[in-house]
Structures are given as structure tokens and as C-alpha cells.
Image: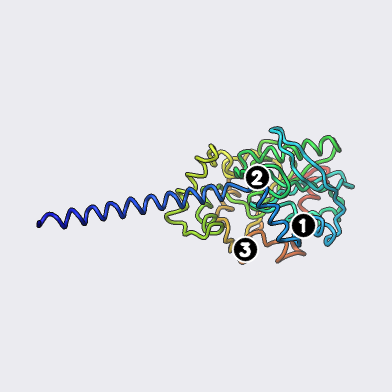
Amino acid sequence: MSNFYPHIIITLVVITVLTAITALFVICQRQAVRLTSSSPTNRQQYAIDHPENSPELLLQQHKLDAQPIELTTSDGLHLFALYAPSTNGATIILSHGYKMSCSEMIPIAALLARQGYGVLLPDQRSHGRSDGNTISFGYHEWRDLEAAVNFLVEQNPHDKIGIFGNSMGGALAVVYAAREPLIAAVIAQSPYASVGHSINKGVSKFSGLPAFPFAPLIHYLAQRRLGIDTAKVAPVNTIAAIAPRPIMLLMGGSDQTVEAEGIFVLQQAAGANCSLWFEPELDHVEFYQRKPEEFAHRIVGFYNHALLSKNPVSH
């Protein structure tokens, strides 16, 4: 009888631990699916629930004369995009953030268009009105930017091409520019150095769960579900290949979505061709909203120098 109770206690402890592990795995598996999924049905419902974010309304509000077009990727997806041609010989591709759409980029596109720049704003795959159900954090999305570049080359083969990206779109811009020499200048606002580096904040932001113990397992299960290695599309591992083309990085020190200190790692990896605008008090992609005059001066000045100057040099 004396040995009976210890055995019960041990059994209960084992059952409790196994139950907790199982619950942890189930929760993380569900979150991995949710964070890497974006169904057309959910996106259509979001558009119905938030008419204030429709591209048509925002185009009117910001007086941007851009027309809807369709891009086709090399793997057969159809992407919704907005396009306004250039009057100064250069066009900027604007790449939106995670679970956003081209509407996010319309205010910045309007700013650039007023200076004569062409603008092309695609909805990435599995975002907005484009085809797709799965988000792979750049592993497949580079084909979306490839389709955008191919379209611009067909329209105006002699125009220069720059890119501006927000958050995940900024990370994608860096990774794509590293492999595509036609991208002559890059601006990335609030990009992550790598998915793994920012997974703790990302999980907390988009799932509401604490980083520990959920974030590492969600990251692992998401990669397993997608069949990818996010390190292969980490900006920190690719940004050096952009040199000597100019890059500008923007980061707020109070960013609650990605790890702000990762921007210094990116800057160091990029080399002398990279400039950094860091504002300690700003949150995620807040530069345009919080510092509009300085934003306009810096961004337009950067592209003017990089794309319109006869002899651009790194900043």
C-alpha cells in the first residue's frame, strides 16, 4: 500500500505533462496554419466589412490616377495590381505588408506620382484580390515582383525601376532586388532581418500568444507545412548582393511587430551602399503618417538621386 500512492502521483504527472505537450502542439499547429493561410473568401469578407480600405476609394481620396491591371506570375497565378505610367523615366514598385493589400501603399504611391514617377502596386499572392491561399514569406512571392518587373520592361524597356516595401513587403523587396539587377534602388520600411529573428514579436502580434513557449514551435510547424526554410529568404542573408545599388532602410525603435534591432544587422550586412533612417519613438511602418514632410523629402530625394541622376553614387 505504501508504494501505491507514489505510483498514482507519477502516473498523474505523466498524464498531465503529455496532455500539456499535446495541447501545446495542437495550438501551435492551428496557429501555423492560420498565420500562413489567407483564403479568398476571408479576404472578400474583409473587403465587404471595410469599404474604407477599398483601392477605388483610396485612389480617389489621394488623387492617384492609377488603373487596375492583371499580372501573371511564372507559376500561373493572376495578380491584381494598380498602375500609373511614368513621366520622368522611372517607376517604383510598391510592395505591401503581411495580410495587407495594395491599398496600404496608395498614399506613398500618390506622393511619388506627383513627382513624375510611375507606380505599380501589386496585391501579392494570397493577398487582396490576387490568386492564392498560402503565404510563404518570400519563398514564392518573389515571382510576384518578377511579374511586376516583366510588365514594366514590356511597357517602357528604358525606364529605371525602383522598389519600396513595407514590413514583409520590405523584406521581400530586399530579397528580390538581391537576385534581380534591374532593380536600381531599394527602400524597405520596417523590414525584418529574418522571420526567425522576429518570430517572437510576430507571434505575439498576430496570434496574441506569448512568445514562449509558442513561437519556436509555430515557426517550425509553419516551415514544415510550407515545405520551406525561411533562412533561404532572410534579408540578412541576401542584402549584401544588392551592392553597389543604393538601399535605404527605415525603422522605428518602438516597433511592436518586428525586432527593431534587426535593422542594424541588416545595415551592417548591406555595406556602404546602405543608409538608415531610424526614429526611436516610431512604431511599425509609421514614417509616412508621423513624419510626412521629412518622409517626402527623404524618399523622393533618394529616388531622384538613385534613378534620375546621371551619375548616382551610394549614400
* Position of residue 258 in the picture relative to residue 29 (left or right): right
Q: Nearer the viewer, mark 3 or mark 1?
A: 1
- Tell me the tag on residue 283: 3
Pinpoint residue 44: horizontal percent, then vertical percent: 70, 52
Give the secondary structure at mark 3.
Answer: loop
- Given the image, on which type of amino acid does mark 1 rest? Ser
Pinpoint residue 55: horizontal percent, then vertical percent: 79, 55
- The residue most toward the front is 1
Pinpoint residue 103: horizontal percent, then vertical percent: 75, 55
User: Measuring 79% from the left and 41% from the top, which residue is drawn there?
Assistant: 70
Judging by the rendered image, the residue that carries numbered circle 1 is: 54
Give the secondary structure at mark 2.
Answer: helix
- Tell me the tag on residue 225: none
- Given the image, on which type of amino acid does mark 3 rest? Asp
- Given the image, on which type of amino acid does mark 2 rest? Leu
User: Tag 3 or tag 2, which sits nearer the N-term?
Assistant: 2
Q: Nearer the viewer, residue 229 or 67?
A: 67
Quarter of the view holding residue 9:
bottom left
For label 2, the crowd category at 10 Å Cα-Cα, with few meaning under 14, some 14 to 19 and many 20 or more, is many
Q: Is residue 275 visible?
A: no
Q: Is residue 154 above or below residue 162?
A: above
Q: Nearer the viewer, residue 257 or 51?
A: 51
Q: CA distance from mark 3 to mark 1?
A: 24 Å
